[in-house]
Amino acid sequence: MSINIAIDGPVASGKGAVTKGLSKKLGIPALDTGAAYRAVTLFLLENNIDLQDEKLILMNLNKINLRLYMAENHDVRVFTQGQDVTGRIRDNRVSLAVPTVAAYAGVRDYVNHQIAVVASQGNYILEGRDIGTVVLPNADYKFYLTASLEVRAQRRKADLDAKGEHLSLLEVMQQVKQRDEQDINRKIAPLRQAPDAIYVDSSNLTLEQTIDTLAKYIKL
């Protein structure tokens, strides 16, 4: 019997790091669903496809050939057109553009199909914004992970600094707030806590404490 664990939450809530840590602690592979949307967005940007032209975007989806592979160390590698783009999907330009792309119903259907195919093949921890509400509504365990706006902006800024993209904390806070508004107010699969999801605020928790908080609810 396979086990699926869904972790949803807003941008920079720590979903990625917590998911990786929980994966290591439980020995269950982690699947970063947001990476799939980022890969689609990167493809559109690099091919100069107008992100406001939904029809044109949908016409190009079949050219992307999106594939998600689980490496031996349980890291997800993301490919488009046969090329590994994992190292480029976290660029800030992708982060700023992905809410627009992810809001299109056709894009979500395309990505969710790829995710569902992988998830059906075994035990996985999946993180994103609509895993427990749309992608895997019957997941065995669901969590909604969040933190205060300031804490999330600090985390996001640290990530950008590490990649050489230096923005002020105020600029990053504005970006995070804008992303929240886009995710919460989009018409298709908006960000929300599933009714049966466990709410976890990590504002005052270390990464290890957050991982342990989720782990105590999971029975293998």
Image (spheres, grey):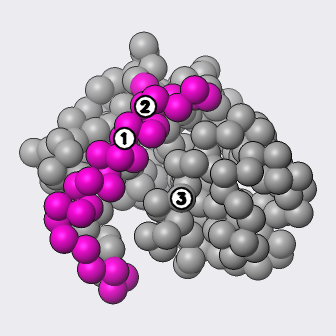
Badge 3 is on which residue?
97
Q: Kindly report the distance in space between the C-alpha atoms of the residues bearing marks 3 and 2.
A: 16 Å
- In the image: residue 36, left or right of residue 120: left
Where residue 12 sits in the image (x, y, percent)? 33, 53
The quarter of the image holding the N terminus is top right
Choose the circle earlier in sequence order: 3 or 2: 3
Question: Disc 1 residue type?
Answer: Asp
Based on the picture, tell me whether residue 168 belongs to the magenta stretch.
yes
* Image point (53%, 66%), residue name: 94
Position above or below: 143 against 138: below
Task: Residue 180: give its label.
Answer: 1
Badge 2 is on which residue?
184
- In the image: residue 114, left or right of residue 188: right
Mark 3 packing: few (<14 Cα in 10 Å), some, or many (20+)? some
Image quadrant where residue 143 sits: top left
Question: Disc 3 residue type?
Answer: Ala
